[in-house]
Every structure is written in structure tokens, then in C-alpha cells.
Image (cartoon, rainbow, N blue to C red):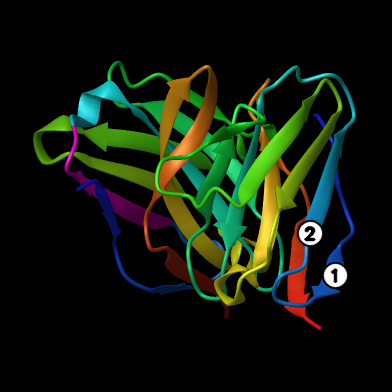
């Protein structure tokens, strides 16, 4: 069965960087994309960007340009998101989600989430 | 960016009720509209894609309709496990955006 398993809780100071991983299993990793979506405490969902696991093309949300990098490692079927210059408003649960195109793009499987707390 | 407006923001309902949630977009997105359910402390779960297609494994009491700028998620007979927050999401153009969510609570 399809599974996305994310790395654990992170606590970072303002200005630091964080890198969250998402290990996929149960499907052909390079046949789909991975999106990253975050959710601040008590808030809604925010799409951060997308990476194709096939050719590593990326598409990032404008507000994160210059601070975010999404990568994949085909040998381990793992996707990563790195966020630099962390601020308090980056405190959120970060989710990876498999992105599939079937008539439209949608997110059919999600990781369990990784809490990233930014605090001095 | 395409703005997504869900209504209502919250609602109270009883088991067995028919529940309707609407999502309006700031420009036409044809059928590039998906619906997700999220329970507290859990990742979202896909219910409906392409406005009206039921995701495999999702109960048939969930249905979606609409095209262009106006969309609806309907739960035909609310069950105890359906109390959750529901989000619409457009994938017509990046940045892919979500509605603010509709929380369905027990009356």
C-alpha cells in the first residue's frame, strides 16, 4: 500500500534552516510528483510547492521563493523540503502529499506531518 | 492567485442530516476542484477530485458538483465519523490554493 513517512519533530531558532524528509513506498516513486503543504497552528492549509520525482522540475509558491528548495532522491524514494531563514510564522505542521494527474491534479496520499517550531 | 471562499465557515448538524458546503473561486477553474476532509491531528484525506469524482474508498454519501466558479460538497446523511473540517482546493493554476475550511460540528 502507498505510504509516505515523514521525519520527526524539529525545533529551530529564527534564522536557522530546516530540512524535512518524506520517504515513499508502495508505488513507483518516479511516476508521480510530491507537493508540500503546511498548516500553521489552528489555521488552514497552504501549498508550498511541487516537485516532479520524474525529472525534478519544481514549482514553488511565490511567497517562499528564495527560501525554499525541494529535492528528491530516487535511490531511496525520498523527497525533501528545505526552508531557510526561518521565522516564527514558519511554525507549522509540514505535510508531503503525492500529487497525481487524473483529469486534474490532486493529492491522493499524504504523509503524517512534521511539526516544525521556530522559537528563540 | 485564485482566491477560494468557502461557506459557511462552520456549521452544526446532527447525525443523519444532509449537509452542503459551498466553495466559490475568484475566477473560472472549470472542474479543477478537489475536496479534502481533515480530522484533528491528522493529515487531510482526499474525498472528491475533478469537482465530482469520488475517490476510491470514500463512502458514497459524499458527492461533489459544480464547474466554473461555484462548487458544492454534499454529505447526504451525516455520520458520526464525518465531524471534521472540510477544505476545497483548486489545481487550475499555481499556486494551488485552498479554501479557509468549513468545520462541521455536532449539534
Segment colored magenta: A18-27
User: Secondary structure under badge 2?
Assistant: strand
Residue A50 at x, y percent in the picture: 48, 31
Q: Can the viewer see residue A70 in this picture?
A: yes
In the image, is residue A81 above or below residue A88?
Answer: above
Q: Nearer the viewer, mark 1 or mark 2?
A: 2
Q: Can the viewer see residue A63 in this picture?
A: no
Name the residue beneath numbered marker 1: B11
Q: Is residue B96 left or right of residue A4?
A: right
In this view, the residue in front, B69 or A7, is B69
Residue A28 at x, y percent in the picture: 18, 29
Q: Which mark is residue B19?
A: 2
> Could you tell me which residue is drawn at 55 percent across and 48 percent down?
B60
- Indicate yes or no whether the magenta region holds residue A19: yes
In whole angstroms, how far apart are the C-alphas of marks 1 and 2? 9 Å
In this view, the residue in front, B106 or A54, is B106
Q: Which mark is residue B21?
A: none
**First in sequence: mark 1 vs mark 2:** 1
Residue A9 at x, y percent in the picture: 37, 73
In the image, is residue B28 above or below residue B106?
Answer: above
State the quadrant of the C terminus of chain A: bottom right
Kindly report the secondary structure that dominates the magenta region of the rendered protein. strand
Amino acid at each position: 500500500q502507498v505510504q509516505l513517512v515523514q521525519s520527526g519533530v524539529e525545533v529551530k531558532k529564527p534564522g536557522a534552516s530546516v530540512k524535512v524528509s518524506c520517504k515513499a513506498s508502495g508505488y513507483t516513486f518516479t511516476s508521480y510528483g510530491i507537493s508540500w503543504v503546511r498548516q500553521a497552528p489552528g489555521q488552514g492549509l497552504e501549498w508550498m510547492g511541487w516537485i516532479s520525482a520524474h525529472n525534478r522540475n519544481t514549482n514553488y509558491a511565490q511567497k517562499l521563493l528564495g527560501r525554499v528548495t525541494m529535492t528528491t532522491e530516487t535511490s531511496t524514494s525520498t523527497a525533501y523540503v528545505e526552508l531557510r531563514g526561518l521565522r516564527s510564522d514558519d511554525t507549522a505542521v509540514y505535510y508531503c502529499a503525492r500529487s497525481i494527474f487524473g483529469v486534474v491534479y490532486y493529492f491522493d496520499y499524504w504523509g503524517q506531518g512534521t511539526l516544525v517550531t521556530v522559537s528563540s | 492567485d485564485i482566491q477560494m471562499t468557502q461557506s459557511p465557515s462552520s456549521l452544526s448538524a446532527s447525525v443523519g442530516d444532509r449537509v452542503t458546503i459551498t466553495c466559490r473561486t475568484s475566477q473560472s477553474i472549470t472542474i479543477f476542484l478537489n475536496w479534502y476532509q481533515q480530522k484533528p491531528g491528522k493529515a487531510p484525506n482526499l474525498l472528491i477530485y475533478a469537482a465530482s469524482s469520488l475517490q476510491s474508498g470514500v463512502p458514497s454519501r459524499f458527492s461533489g458538483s459544480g464547474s466554473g466558479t461555484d462548487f458544492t460538497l454534499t454529505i447526504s446523511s451525516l455520520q458520526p465519523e464525518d465531524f471534521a473540517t472540510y477544505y476545497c482546493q483548486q489545481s487550475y493554476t499555481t499556486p494551488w490554493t485552498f479554501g479557509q475550511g468549513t468545520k462541521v460540528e455536532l449539534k
